[in-house]
Image (tube, helix red, strand yellow):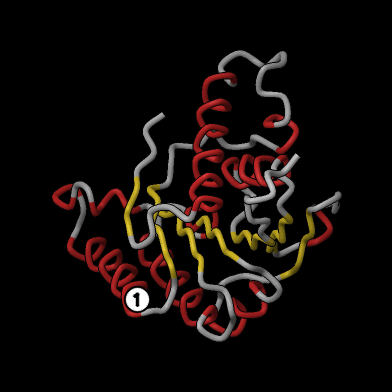
């Protein structure tokens, strides 16, 4: 049962086709939130109670606005859309921030390769500039944003894996599954409790 004081979100998820995306969808649905997953091919997905799919992306501000339409908050998993590409992630973030400016949505959780903010010396000047551009765009916006370092992921974990994290698992899957499930739970906690606005976080689990 939902606590009557806990807000129910219609959460728009960009980049759902990843292990963290699947973990988040399972966690959100388990707490009775509604999820709109933005994908590029509807044929690969089947809707289920509380989970809807729509065609879209973050190619430009208009596409971002259309994808986010109808939501009350957004989580964007940039590495699922531009893996290992900080320039690409910066472009996606720019399109998303510009698109959300035309909506009533204010809450944005942005997951990306933001480790550069913690250890800038490990990255090139271009990579540092890309992330600085992301932060600057967020700070100039009216959004209530949080930056989250992308966790290490084991590819290929589907929603069915996260529904049964205590069940019988293939060797080597249990710990990555539980770690991602804990991160997903922490992200949804942050959303529900409206924590860490304007902050950069790294989940250590």
Name the image quarter holding the N terminus: top right
| SS class, disc 1 | helix
Q: Position of residue 154 (x, y in %)?
A: 54, 33
Q: Position of residue 71 (x, y in %)?
A: 67, 69
Question: Measured along the vertical axis of the image, is residue 189 above or below residue 205?
Answer: below
> In the displayed image of the protein, which residue is found farthest to the front?
4
Question: Measured along the vertical axis of the image, is residue 73 above or below residue 61?
Answer: above
Residue 52, quarter of picture: bottom right
As rendered, which of 155 and 3 lies closer to the eye? 3
| Image point (70%, 37%), residue name | 158
| Image point (29%, 48%), residue name | 115
| Image point (66%, 73%), residue name | 67
**Residue with the mark numbered 1:** 137
Residue 135, quarter of picture: bottom left
Is 36 positioned to the left or the right of 204 in the image?
Answer: right
Q: Position of residue 68 (x, y in %)?
A: 64, 72
Q: Residues within 10 Å of mark 1 (few under 14, many from 20)?
A: some
Q: Position of residue 100 (x, y in %)?
A: 53, 78
Question: Measured along the vertical axis of the image, is residue 10 above or below residue 189?
Answer: below
| Image point (68%, 44%), residue name | 3
Is 6 positioned to the left or the right of 109 in the image?
Answer: right
Is 123 positioned to the left or the right of 1 in the image?
Answer: left
Question: Measured along the vertical axis of the image, is residue 31 above or below residue 141?
Answer: above
As rendered, which of 59 and 28 lies closer to the eye? 28
As rendered, which of 135 and 56 lies closer to the eye? 135
């Amino acid at each position: 049962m939902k606590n009557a004081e806990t807000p129910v979100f219609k959460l728009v998820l960009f980049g759902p086709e990843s292990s963290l995306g699947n973990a988040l969808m399972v966690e959100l649905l388990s707490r009775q939130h509604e999820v709109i997953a933005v994908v590029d091919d509807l044929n690969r997905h089947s809707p289920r109670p509380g989970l809807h799919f729509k065609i879209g992306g973050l190619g430009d501000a208009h596409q971002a606005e259309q994808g986010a339409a109808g939501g009350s908050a957004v989580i964007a998993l940039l590495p699922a859309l531009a893996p290992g590409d900080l320039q690409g992630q910066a472009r996606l973030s720019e399109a998303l921030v510009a698109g959300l400016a035309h909506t009533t949505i204010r809450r944005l959780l942005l997951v990306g390769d933001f480790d550069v903010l913690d250890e800038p010396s490990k990255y090139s000047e271009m990579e540092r500039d890309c992330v600085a551009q992301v932060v600057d765009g967020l700070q100039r916006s009216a959004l209530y944003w949080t930056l989250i370092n992308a966790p290490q992921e084991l590819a290929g974990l589907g929603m069915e894996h996260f529904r049964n994290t205590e069940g019988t698992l293939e060797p080597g899957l249990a710990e990555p599954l539980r770690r991602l499930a804990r991160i997903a739970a922490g992200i949804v906690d942050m959303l529900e409790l409206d924590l860490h606005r304007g902050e950069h976080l790294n989940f250590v689990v």
